[in-house]
Image (cartoon, rainbow, N blue to C red):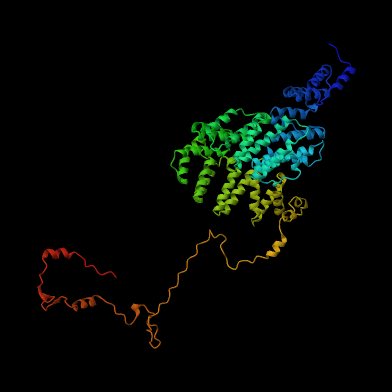
Amino acid sequence: MTTSTPASLSLLLKNLSLDENQSHEEVLRHANNILKSSSDPETIRTRIVALIKLERYEEAIKSIVQAGTSSGLEFEHAYSLYKLGDLKGALDISADKVETERRQRALKHLHAQAQYRAEDFESATAIYEELSSLPPLVENEDYDLRVNLGASEAQLSFVGKDGLRPKKRATAEDLQQYESAFNAACISIARGDLNAGLMLLKTSKKLCSSLEGVSEEDIQAELAPLIAQELYVLIKLGKLEEAVALYKSSDILETSDEAVKLVASANCYLTSQTPNPHVGLRVLEALQKVPQGSQKPFTFQSDSLDRNVTALNLQAGKENAAITSAKAMKAKNPNDFTISSVIATIELQNSDSSSAKSIAKTLKGDASRKLGSTADIGIAFINAQNYLKENNVTSAVAVIETLLKDLEGEPEKRWLPGLVGVVAGLYTLQGRKTKVKAELENASAYWRSTTHPDPAVLLATGTAQLNSSNLQDRTMAASIFESLAASNPSQLSNAGYIASHPAEDMPSKIALLTPLNTLLKGININALLDSGVAAPPTKKRPLDEATSKPQIKSRKKRKIRLPKGGIDPNKKPDPERWLPLRDRSTYKPKGRKDKKKGRDLTQGGAVTDKDGDTEMIGGNTVTKVAPSQSTASKNKGKKKGGKRK
């Protein structure tokens, strides 16, 4: 075996290059030849980079481990782990140990990308914002940061975690490159502005199609996610014919991106006006192989696909398959309570339950057992919503309070932000402000004790306590907004911090708020002056006519009736005309004696003679016969009824 001389070693080192035009196999061969006789650090790094270029990541990691921790290959190590899907391992390599600023910055870029693939979009956004605040070190780094930051913000919007972030709109700078236009479109779509998203998607497609110096194959690969997103928007807007035409003309099934192919095919099944669930199941089964690595769908995408499979099984009459799928989803994501609706649908299919009370009774037993927990938040929400549809707020509150009692031993579920919001909303409907305040304070205390406090809960608690006149509550609000301004800086948290610290002079934080000129930009001052000052109402009127008490209809006055001949001015009116009839002096009541007297005086009436033996009736003499003993005894016990008055 021959050894290399210093001259030959120097010649070999000159042949090492990582230029894109050079074969990486050739670079690797040269590096291996050099390392047979020398352990040059630069040659080791070149060999590892060549292995990475050839996608031989496991061999690269072995070489990095053999080189030791002092080799300065932290970035290459993290990158190889990232490409193998070991996101945690890549994130565990700290950037603080990197010596040069350039490589430290590169490792932070990689950490942000790993956080993005790990679906920790908040951390990824924070890293990109930190890097964007620093001057760029390489060419086009500022553009890459802006694109990646836009992608992270779009994912935050899709998962519903952008509540505290300012609502950005697409700028002229975003419309210059197709990547930034696509990110702006995704943000609009995630926030429900589908028409604006569709316009931005078409702009992005136009920019992508006009790229120069890019092969047609690469352009089609870049267009695939844009077309998949456009299909989704068209379906959501109900433009099914346009979606079908786009699907057929795009050849999206030919793309190499398995995630895009899966999502687009699943969505295009919905373009049929009368979708057949059996056909839908076959479509999803044909794409059952879920892509892995960088092409793996995000959790919110794969969960939606799993829900679609469960719903299709239910529509196809495969109840057992639907229950099995629902249980698998529940085991994978215990906090996904939308699965409860599938079980509830199955339980209510063969039930005659129509009222909220009967539905709650039906779901109480079998549905809870199938879900594996009696304290299922999804089932409780279904029952509460049914009660609210019947305007029965009391029963809805009772359902949620029973749930809260069952969740006392599970604080991670008890203090979920969505559940806290529902509880506070129901108590607000009942006007129980003390309960709302206590719920928010307890939720805030729990989240502040965790490593990742929920900013929405803290913001709601701080706002409620800031409106209180109690000094202790305002002190707590100041503490909450101080922590929010430090961990989640935004215009809302900064505004809360300023409002909770009125005695402090903080021009730096005031400068972060939206300027007054921007807030007043769309207001026409002259029109306001011309319309004048609104005068306050003179009478108190109900704020809402629907909730105001119905007005009592006034009685119509009776028309005064006069005698036909008119009023005689010479005739003196009766002074007792205003008195009731029985109170007048002319009133003569008719009693029993008067009735008897009138009866005796009646012409043709009965007249008794002196002896009482005969009566004269109609001029004829009638002999009275005494009643028999039996008749008398019968009538003896009868009471004589008097006349009703």
In this picture, residue 465 sits left or right of residue 628: right
Q: How many marks?
A: 0
| Along the viewing direction, whichever of 527 and 327 lies nearer the viewer | 527
| Along the viewing direction, whichever of 87 and 159 lies nearer the viewer | 159
Q: Residue furthest right?
A: 7
Q: Visible in this render: residue 161?
A: no
Q: Residue furthest bottom?
A: 570
Q: Is residue 435 above or below residue 121?
A: below
Residue 174 on image: x %, y % = 74, 42
| Along the viewing direction, whichever of 61 and 412 lies nearer the viewer | 61
In this picture, residue 71 sits left or right of residue 424: right
Classify residue 589 by image quadrant. Answer: bottom left
Q: Residue furthest top?
A: 1
Which residue is located at x 39 percent, y 88 percent?
Answer: 570
Q: Is residue 135 above or below residue 42?
A: below
Which residue is located at x 59 percent, y 50 percent?
Answer: 438
Classify residue 581 by image quadrant. Answer: bottom left
| Along the viewing direction, whichever of 384 and 376 lies nearer the viewer | 384
- Quarter of the picture containing the N terminus is top right
- Quarter of the picture containing the C terminus is bottom left
Q: Visible in this render: residue 430?
A: yes
Residue 234 on image: x %, y % = 62, 40
In this picture, residue 118 sits left or right of residue 69: left
Residue 521 on image: x %, y % = 73, 55
Residue 225 on image: x %, y % = 67, 35
In this picture, residue 1 sits left or right of residue 383: right
